[in-house]
Image: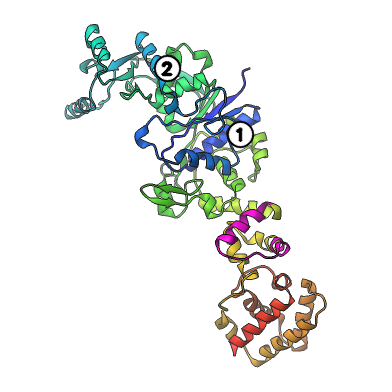
């Protein structure tokens, strides 16, 4: 058996959608499971849609997800170049080969003439308004024009395209790794353009030629490409490469939360969640946030994506990349679309934050603290805080809200909440607590708690009524881990300072 080779082939036209990352992930998992190669190929044949910086953005996204390809523009191998625009001189000979074998033809129609045909057919009430077997003989192409005229037009380089000559009344058969045996009629499929007037191939020609030349063994792509499959299968046949045709798998769509259609960027904007892996600076819409910037761990992001269309047949939901690589199989990928659930996505992230070590979280959390100008002067204290609050964080950005008070004393205290049940007895309790705290030789959580509760008992006050006020004095709000753990991390003097400041505010 030949070495497994798969490819992820995005177009550099904008942000990398969830569906695109999942396609890359499934390719990666399959390749690594079989000790194969994962290739990145940039499909930039449509230069009108090319966006500067999009290619590097794609590479950055894959790098963040830890699914970097073995070959690609950033890491050339023996099958390059890996940008289709740099392979332009390859495709014409293959297009001409198809014309010579009678499976394609030159079309000299202008875009205006093609549009005029469609308008004419619509006016006649025709359902079929495609450039296909029913209409191609009414157009200006090498199937209609005399051979001499065709050659003359080619000689003067008259603008033209090459179209596949789709057969009539035939069925194309192929096996899909997800959907099984598929039979599709050629009727209804138009004569797709294979080579454009500027010499650039369309996706249909380039994907087949490049997959052949790069020795791709398996082609995984979104189900939106299923209607084009007959064209691609026929091209493999017409070139005489059938035995080398990759095994296809058309992946299910990622659907809107209500299941009504494919998830789009607009859905994210409307419902308040990202659909891109990382922040993308859209030339038209400006900066669009991604999952990374929202505070997702890459482990959680790819874990969530993998399960949007696949499971291993068990109840397990949390998978490391290594576990996914070991257990992934294409026959466990679902045929039908998977609804995207942002709350479930956050659940994955929360679970990953909880299970991650302080060492894994430290650098990411430190960057976020630096972005918020929160000074970290004591590394040991910082590590202790991460361990203390990580179970309370759903997103990495939550570490700021849950942990900034350890470094910066709260500017405002919710004194109104304290004053609701405040009296002189409670005031005296905290005055005496300051004195007792200052005498403590040990500042462990247990010692702090023991002193607090002994004084409460002596003052005949319920500890529960006092601990809420104590938390507000230290934190500023009603959140955070255990109040005695908080005071232990803050330190003896800082705890005393915050109680003193709060008492002065309550006068």
Indicate which disc, 1 or 2, sits on the residue closer to the N terminus. 1
Front residue (pair 189, 71): 71
- Magenta stretch, residue numbers: 360-384
55 drawn magenta = no
Instruction: Determine whether the residue tagged by mark 1 lies in a helix, strand or loop.
Output: helix
Could you tell me residue 14's position as x and y percent?
Answer: 42, 42
Check disc 1: other Cα within 10 Å, few if <14, some if 14-19, many if 20+. Answer: many
> Quadrant of the rendered structure where residue 24 is?
top right
Please give the name of the residue rendered at 60% of the width and 65% of the height, measured from the top-left corner: 374
Would you say 182 lies left or right of 409 here? left
Q: According to the image, label 1 marks what residue?
A: 29
Q: Could you tell me how far apart the alpha carbons at marks 1 and 2 are, in whole angstroms?
A: 28 Å
Residue extending furthest toward the bottom: 424
369 drawn magenta = yes
Q: According to the image, label 2 marks what residue?
A: 235
Would you say 323 lies left or right of 7 here? right
Characterize the magenta stretch by its predominant secondary structure.
helix
Would you say 40 lies left or right of 404 here? left
Tell me the quarter of the image containing the C terminus. bottom right
């Amino acid at each position: 058996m030949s070495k497994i080779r798969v490819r992820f082939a995005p177009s550099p036209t904008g942000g990398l959608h969830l569906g695109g990352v999942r396609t890359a992930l499934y390719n990666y998992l399959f390749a690594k499971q079989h000790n194969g190669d994962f290739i990145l190929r940039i499909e930039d044949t449509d230069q009108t849609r090319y966006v500067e910086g999009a290619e590097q953005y794609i590479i950055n996204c894959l790098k963040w997800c830890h699914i970097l390809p073995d070959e690609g523009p950033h890491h050339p191998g023996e099958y390059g170049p890996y940008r289709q625009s740099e392979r332009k001189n390859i495709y014409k000979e293959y297009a001409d080969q198809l014309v010579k074998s009678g499976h394609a033809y030159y079309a000299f129609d202008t875009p205006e003439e093609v549009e005029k045909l469609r308008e004419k057919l619509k006016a006649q009430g025709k359902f079929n308004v495609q450039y296909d077997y029913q209409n191609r003989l009414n157009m200006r192409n090498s199937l209609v024009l005399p051979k001499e005229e065709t050659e003359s037009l080619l000689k003067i380089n008259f603008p033209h395209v090459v179209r596949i000559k789709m057969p009539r009344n035939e069925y194309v058969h192929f096996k899909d790794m997800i959907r099984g045996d598929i039979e599709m009629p050629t009727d209804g499929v138009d004569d797709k353009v294979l080579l454009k007037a500027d010499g650039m191939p369309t996706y249909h020609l380039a994907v087949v030629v490049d997959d052949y030349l790069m020795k791709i063994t398996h082609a995984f792509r979104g189900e939106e490409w299923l209607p084009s499959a007959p064209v691609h299968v026929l091209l493999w046949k017409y070139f005489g490469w059938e035995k080398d045709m990759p095994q296809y798998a058309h992946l299910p769509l990622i659907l809107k939360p209500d299941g009504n259609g494919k998830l789009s960027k607009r859905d994210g904007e409307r419902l308040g969640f990202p659909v891109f892996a990382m922040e993308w600076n859209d030339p038209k819409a400006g900066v669009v946030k991604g999952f990374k910037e929202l505070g997702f761990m890459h482990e959680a992001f790819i874990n969530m994506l993998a399960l949007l269309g696949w499971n291993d047949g068990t109840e397990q939901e949390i998978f490391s990349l290594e576990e996914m690589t070991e257990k992934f199989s294409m026959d466990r990928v679902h045929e039908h679309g998977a609804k995207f659930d942002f709350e479930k996505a956050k659940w994955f992230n929360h679970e990953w934050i909880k299970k991650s070590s302080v060492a894994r979280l430290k650098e990411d959390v430190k960057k976020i603290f630096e972005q918020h100008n929160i000074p970290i002067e004591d590394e040991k204290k910082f590590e202790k805080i991460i361990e203390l609050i990580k179970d309370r964080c759903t997103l990495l950005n939550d570490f700021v809200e849950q942990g900034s008070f350890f470094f910066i004393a709260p500017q405002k205290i919710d004194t109104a909440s304290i004053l609701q049940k405040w009296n002189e007895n409670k005031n005296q309790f905290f005055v005496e607590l300051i004195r007792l705290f200052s005498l403590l030789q040990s500042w462990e959580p247990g010692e702090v708690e023991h002193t607090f509760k002994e004084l409460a008992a002596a003052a005949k006050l319920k500890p529960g009524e006092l601990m809420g006020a104590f938390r507000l004095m230290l934190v500023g709000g009603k959140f955070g881990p255990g109040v005695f753990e908080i005071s232990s991390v803050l330190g003896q003097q800082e705890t005393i300072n915050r109680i003193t400041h709060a008492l002065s505010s309550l006068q």
